[in-house]
Image (tube, rainbow, N blue to C red):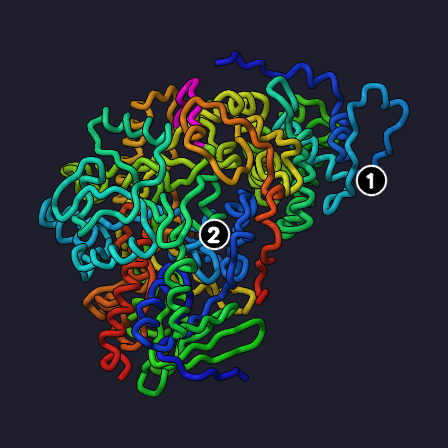
Amino acid sequence: MSTRAKEADVVVIGLGAGGGTAVLPLARAGLEVVGLEAGGRFSVRDFHADEIRNDIRNWLGRAKVNDEVPTQRRTAAEDSVPAIAPGRMMNAVGGTSIHWTCQSWRLMPWNFNQRSDTIRRYGAGALPAGSTLTDWPLDYEELEPYYDKVEFLHGVSGKAGNLSGVIDPSGNVFEGPRDREYPLPPLRRTGFTEFMADAARRLGWHPFAGPSAIRSQPYNGLNACEYHGFCTWGGCHVDAKGSTNLTAIPMAEKTRNLKIVEGARAIEITVDRDGKANGVRYLKGRKEHFQPAKAVLLAGYTYENTRLLLLSASSAFPNGLSNNHGQVGRHYLAHVRAGANGVIPGRRLNRFSGTASQWTAVDDWDSDFFDHTSLGFTGGGTMSATMEAKPIGAARTTPPSIPRWGSAWKAWLKENAISVASAATQINVAPYEDIFLDLDPTTKDPDGFPVVRVTNDLKENERRAALFVQGKCMDWLREAGASEVWPVAPSSPSVQTHAYGGTRMGDDPAVDVTDRWCFSHEVPNLGVLGASNFPTSGGRNPTETVMALAWRTADHLVDEWEAITG
Amino acid sequence: MQPYEGGGADSRALSRRDLLKRAGIVGVAAAAPTAAMAPEAAPVRPRERLEALTAAEAETVEAMVDRLIPSDASGPGAAEGRVTRYIDRALGGELAPLRASYSDGLAAVDAYAQSRFGDRFADLNEAQQDAVLTAMEQNVATGFAGGSRAFFELVREHCLQGMFGDPVHGGNEDFAGWDLIGFPGVKLSFGAAEQQMDVIVVPAHKSTADFPIFKGGRKGARDEH
């Protein structure tokens, strides 16, 4: 037996970066919105400066995600195994926008047109073999106004490199044109970030202060950064991060049109006889509830969006909701990461403070900003050199030339840990025919529902791109003066926080789950928010794009309310 | 670069059991300090009851982490850092699902030590202990379900967590791990000068538990609503 609530105009499943953004334009338009959130409300008291609690145990994910980590395998011929999950999302009002690093990027214009641009410049033979690569159904210019809204909502800190086509070399000269300057200047530059910027300039590259959704100055009554050094995987102890629980969600609550249900674990999106979504079943504690609504916005993380659709089978959708074309879970992809470390002999780098959002970024080896002829891959990735080294992580960061334990290892750490520099990249990834998500046949969460199974392998295009940019990371460290440089191998496909696809957006219902507005092709009043819509990953962090797309989808729902819900 | 002085001769003056005793990790079964032990005894810390490990298991863990992060010329090691206390507490709490892996793994360590050197791991000499750990790391030590490397990596990871994690979890006693690598400790704010290169940041020697703003939060568990 379930408890039935009063019908809402819109029910939003998940109040993180996506759902937590979308509720603002919906509530402001006068729609009655119910937000179902698996977590509760956290405050600074919960945001301990503790690497074990945050980075290792993901304390902020205890309400749900820690219990439903996907399984993984390399190919469909293998059995799945529990994923080693170094990075996980979290549950709370505000979701993972609470513990994200806050590197707050717009994608590059090329990312929206990778397929057609690659064919035009290099020919169709340059497309990754076996990929299902498509262009995005929108271009950068269409999303620019929403990037702008998000940046001014949170007070993003950065320096424009392209103001309406006018290039400013003190910002990112490669970025797409933006309508106006960032609301706040970049976060504090440090000795190390400037040291790495100088080295990049000597190499002829174009370094810049990477954009951050951590406020460099007080903004609209919100606090500025104190640089304490426990930002990633933890919430901010002074509420200086771009988290939706500090901005869009309270602003939406102020309208009295948003009701939040904490501790609500969605288990099914239901449909009526016409195949339209009509509500959400959820568990709160052990008790089942039903929230009817005229429109449903699914705003879980990438894995959960696919999972909940596949769990929501009905007579109209026997293989899962919005899956009559068999595309839910397809076109999955995850960032490939690589990089290098190096010792700057005798120098105290003092990276044991601040935020990883205080960083020097280099985009010279991303997208198509360099000639790929005869390189054997398309794309690349942004490179970064950041602050916020933490002690356990530092103890793991030793070169292969020394033992991994014992007196020699310990003496090396004592001598060099303060002098270790790192440069890292995240590689733009294409979707492939044989990489996908589905439900694991045996592993279940504590409520008895199957977890997601990830089938993913490192493909040649991405391996080559990762090794190429990894080489640039090594060049960068050597130029900075590193005496010993060692690579960090391209990451194997893993369950992680930069995962994409499964409900790919596009114009073709045969291969895309959602349309150009991120509404289902098959269920017109079901919208999907999040990176599960992304056709490609881009070579940089996804969150600002998630927020921008969510805002746009919510605006579309408001503008087309009658057509979508009628 | 400072020349590396391997071996840590000064630590050889202390027996393993002395180190154990200093670290307060001797199990309930190990006798209380006796008069015979008293003369060379450094300050003996108050001894906690073990929360998860048996006394024999704790001795094996202590002997392992003592070789992974030795007390030597470069400073205090896992014994002073109370790494075994961290592991014991974790296995009684957050890492309880790994308790059985520890029982099996530690038994396998002792069985392998016995088969190769004729004694349990904790009673081998340091060269023999290092040989066992090396064989485990290289995945050639026999008798481990799932391979010896997996258990080696598990203990090594928890050893790093205990030595370099926040002291609130039972390890990193007196900030031994943080001082080793130059981590300044928890501070609520860092100034611009402290983020310059080559500046010596004065160690705060503070744990997250030392700050009232981090008290009184949620429990955070599933169904806590």
* Nearer to me, A243 or B190: B190
Mark 1, residue position: B28
Indicate the chain on which mark 1 is placed: B
Residue B127: mark: none
Residue drawn at (54%, 72%) of the image:
A284
Q: Name the residue furthest bottom.
A: A273
SS class, disc 1: loop
* Nearer to me, A220 or A27: A220
Which quarter of the rendered picture does the C terminus of chain A lie within?
bottom left
In this rendering, position of residue A430 left or right of residue B97? left
Q: Position of residue A298 (x, y in %)?
A: 37, 69
Q: Which residues are magenta?
A: A342-351
Residue A341 versus residue A183 in the image, above or below? above
Q: Please say whether residue A460 is one of the residues in the magenta stretch.
A: no
Mark 2, residue position: A83
User: Which secondary structure class fits the magenta region best?
Assistant: loop
